[in-house]
Image: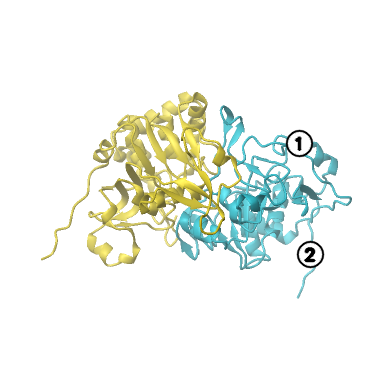
Chain colours: A cyan, B yellow
């Protein structure tokens, strides 16, 4: 029996909750999903409790098909071992499984992206004398290189949505159509960017980033004001689908102490 | 006639003494899981210098080693204090120019260890293509090379194999001959251990060799690779060991907050590392009550 969705009203959820719901919708039932800690972890846990109970969640440290019930702080956290099908290692997850072509969708974060969805997670400032040395690729470059689809989750600020990256850590569509193939990359590249203001996808022909939906209460103008690269804006930009009451209840069960999604006041 | 069981046991102090200044080390553990924390503390106490570390992703213990100026070069994929922020000492030492990091992806590092273990000079992979990771290097004259496969014509990246002087790993169990069992994820330890010219295995427990031989399928590193073994209970604390104990986030957060300043770091280093005579003394300082609070609550592995 199909129940009609009971949507929450703006004000009944936080932006992070909305972002987690947006992320979870990118996971299809039965897919092999590569995720990290933070919001993607919550999104994947939500997907498994709603529309994608058969999704298999893989963590690069070696936990495979995890069914964690407690929130993990580390990608190698023992919590991720709960009812997992296997606990192996990096050559297995990033090598055989991911590079071997078995991963459908990967979730990554970014400190900067450009209009082709190229990602920087390594240096802010110059390579020679950076202002900040960020954590680096980790498995990020491997995931973005080889997964069939990539979802980027990040905060939307002018200094993060840049015309030119300070450092290219992980490959989006590089400098345009055909560039990934020419470079020898096998994965499909980025498919969606979820931010605190909107969702953006990539125009199939030009591979350039395009506004897809704006979150409730956010205007197109506001998105543009917080973006440094040229963003394709279609004529009609729908509002992001609101979270349902069911999804919000589940999110609060998944992260009861607000580790990744702090409770709103 | 039965062969006598070789006894490779040494103390942690003896093990660290074997590592000379400027040595190259594979560093085991991944994220918060099974880092050789006690070994890091002892490297600081023995005032080792100018070490080069190869690893995929490491956290608090590497921040300690860089903070104490034990390590001056790193070839790795990721560093942070996950769930909290950037590793504070490493950040500061980078700004001072006291440490340099050559960056690779996790798969690239893991394959570099596999290549070292296999005895081949490089490994091909399909990551890093098209990025600055190939074109920009900090200190290596050759960091990575894109080439066309002579068989298929496909583009691959070649990364140099690593054969470090020592591989240091912290395992769940080992017998005195050096047969190693690791519960939970293995990260890149299985390959990393085999890459080292000498291999030092620290473990939560030293078990009778008959225990290992009653379940040989659980052995991930056979004794043939292992040079020395060290009994080291709670040797990753305040990080975690699968099936043994959980991390102590209160301690990790305290460390992170305190190390935001050089003074705070110096205070931590003295209080928890240099003023301690041994790993056991560090555990005594943490206190049995606190340790027991973090003991794994079976059947959960944490």
Q: Is residue B31 visible?
A: no
- Judged from this view, the residue extending furthest toward the front is B150
For the point 32% across and 36% down, which residue is it? B42
Q: CA distance from mark 2 to mark 1?
A: 37 Å
Badge 1 is on which residue?
A228
- Name the secondary structure under disc 2: loop
Q: Left or right of A258: which side holds A94? A: left
For the point 76% across and 47% down, which residue is it? A209
Question: On screen, A7 above or below B284?
Answer: below
- Name the secondary structure under disc 1: loop
- Judged from this view, the residue extending furthest toward the left is B1
Q: Left or right of A264: which side holds B18? A: left
Question: On screen, B151 above or below B289?
Answer: below
Q: Which mark is residue A5?
A: 2
* Dot 2 and dot 1 within a common chain: yes
Residue B62 in the image: x percent, y percent?
43, 38
Residue B297 in the image: x percent, y percent?
43, 57
From the image, which quarter does the N terminus of chain B lie in? bottom left
* Chain letter of the residue carrying label 1: A
Residue B127 in the image: x percent, y percent?
55, 50
* Chain letter of the residue carrying label 2: A
Q: Tell which tag, 2 or 1, sits nearer the viewer.
A: 1
Q: Decide: few, some or many residues near mark 2? Use Cα within 10 Å; few <14, some 14-19, many ≥20.
A: few
């Amino acid at each position: 029996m199909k129940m009609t969705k009971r949507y929450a009203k703006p004000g009944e959820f936080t932006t992070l909750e909305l972002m987690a719901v947006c992320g979870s919708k990118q996971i299809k039932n039965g897919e092999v999903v590569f995720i990290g800690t933070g919001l993607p972890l919550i999104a994947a846990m939500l997907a498994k409790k709603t529309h994608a109970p058969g999704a298999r969640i893989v963590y690069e440290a070696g936990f495979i098909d995890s069914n964690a019930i407690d929130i993990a702080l580390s990608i190698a956290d023992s919590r991720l071992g709960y009812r997992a099908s296997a606990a192996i290692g990096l050559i297995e997850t990033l090598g055989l499984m991911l590079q071997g072509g078995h991963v459908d969708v990967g979730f990554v974060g970014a400190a900067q992206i450009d209009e082709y969805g190229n990602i920087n997670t390594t240096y802010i400032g110059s390579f020679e004398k950076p202002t900040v040395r960020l954590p680096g690729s980790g498995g990020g470059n491997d995931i973005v290189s080889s997964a069939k689809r990539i979802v980027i989750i990040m905060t939307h600020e002018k200094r993060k949505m840049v015309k030119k990256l300070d450092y290219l850590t992980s490959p989006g569509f590089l400098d345009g159509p055909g560039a990934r193939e020419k470079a020898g990359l096998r994965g499909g590249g980025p498919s969606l960017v979820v931010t605190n203001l909107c969702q953006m996808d990539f125009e199939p022909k030009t591979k350039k980033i395009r506004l897809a939906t704006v979150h409730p209460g956010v205007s197109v103008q506001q998105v543009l004001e917080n973006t440094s690269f040229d963003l394709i804006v279609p004529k009609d930009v729908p509002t992001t689908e609101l979270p349902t009451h069911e999804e919000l209840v589940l999110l609060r069960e998944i992260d009861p102490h607000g580790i990744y999604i702090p409770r709103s006041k | 006639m039965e062969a006598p069981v070789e006894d490779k046991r040494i103390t942690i102090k003896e093990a660290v003494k074997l590592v000379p200044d400027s040595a190259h080390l594979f560093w085991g553990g991944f994220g918060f899981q099974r880092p050789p924390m006690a070994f890091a503390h002892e490297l600081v106490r023995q005032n080792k210098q100018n070490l080069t570390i190869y690893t995929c992703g490491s956290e608090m213990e590497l921040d300690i080693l860089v903070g104490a100026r034990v390590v001056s070069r790193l070839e790795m994929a990721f560093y942070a204090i996950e769930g909290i922020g950037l590793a504070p000492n490493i950040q500061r030492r980078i700004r001072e120019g006291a440490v340099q990091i050559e960056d690779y992806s996790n798969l690239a590092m893991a394959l570099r260890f596999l290549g070292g273990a296999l005895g081949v000079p490089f490994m091909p992979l399909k990551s890093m293509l098209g990025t600055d990771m190939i074109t920009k290097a900090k200190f290596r004259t050759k960091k990575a090379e894109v080439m066309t496969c002579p068989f298929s014509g496909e583009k691959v990246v070649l990364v140099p194999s690593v054969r470090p002087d020592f591989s240091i790993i912290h395992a769940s169990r080992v017998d005195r001959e050096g047969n190693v069992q690791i519960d939970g994820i293995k990260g890149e330890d299985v390959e990393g251990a085999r890459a080292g010219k000498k291999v030092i295995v620290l473990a939560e427990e030293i078990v009778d060799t008959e225990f290992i031989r009653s379940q040989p399928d659980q052995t991930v590193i056979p004794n043939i690779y292992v040079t020395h073994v060290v009994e080291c209970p709670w040797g990753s604390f305040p990080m975690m060991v699968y099936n043994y104990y959980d991390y102590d986030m209160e301690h990790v957060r305290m460390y992170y907050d305190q190390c935001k300043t050089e003074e705070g770091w110096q205070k931590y280093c003295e209080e928890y590392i240099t003023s301690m005579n041994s790993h056991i003394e560090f555990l005594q300082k943490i206190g049995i009550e606190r340790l027991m609070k973090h003991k794994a609550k079976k059947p959960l592995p944490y």
